[in-house]
Image (spheres, helix red, strand yellow):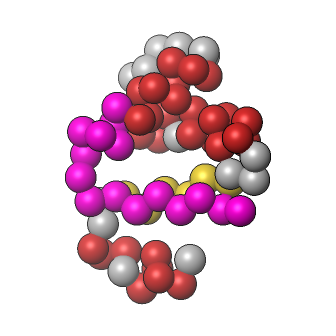
Amino acid sequence: MEYAWAHQDDYNALLFVIADSPQALRTNLAALAGVLVPDAETTDDNLRQLAVLDWLNSNPDWLLILDN
């Protein structure tokens, strides 16, 4: 976290996800869709997760922190 705040100007996005289990990682990645892909008009977590992964692949210079 200290690195992220010290270098926040080096990134277009700082993202933080709780990943203490595989299910938590999937759920919290899907939750990022509300911020990264707000026009994703679905409540299906699998589709939201794919939309977030597409966003990450299409947008450079982000930092994703996986907690735990």
Residue displayed at 42% across by 85% down: 6
Is residue 20 rendered to the left or right of residue 28? right
Expressed as whole percent of the image width and height from the top left, the position of residue 47 reads 51, 18
Residue 37 image-quadrant placement = top left
Q: How many marks?
A: 0
User: In which quadrant is the N terminus drawn?
Assistant: bottom right
Q: Is residue 55 above or below residue 40?
A: below
Residue displayed at 61% across by 53% down: 17
Q: Is residue 66 above or below residue 5?
A: above
Expressed as whole percent of the image width and height from the top left, the position of residue 45 reads 61, 22
User: In which quadrant is the C terminus drawn?
Assistant: bottom right
Q: Is residue 20 above or below residue 53?
A: below
Residue displayed at 40% across by 62% down: 63
Residue 62 part of the magenta-drawn span: yes
Residue 11 image-quadrant placement = bottom left
The magenta stretch spans which residues? Answer: 54-68
Q: Is residue 19 visible?
A: yes
Residue 47 part of the magenta-drawn span: no
Expressed as whole percent of the image width and height from the top left, the position of residue 54 reads 34, 32
Residue 59 image-quadrant placement = top left
Q: Is residue 38 visible?
A: no
Expressed as whole percent of the image width and height from the top left, the position of residue 42 reads 53, 14
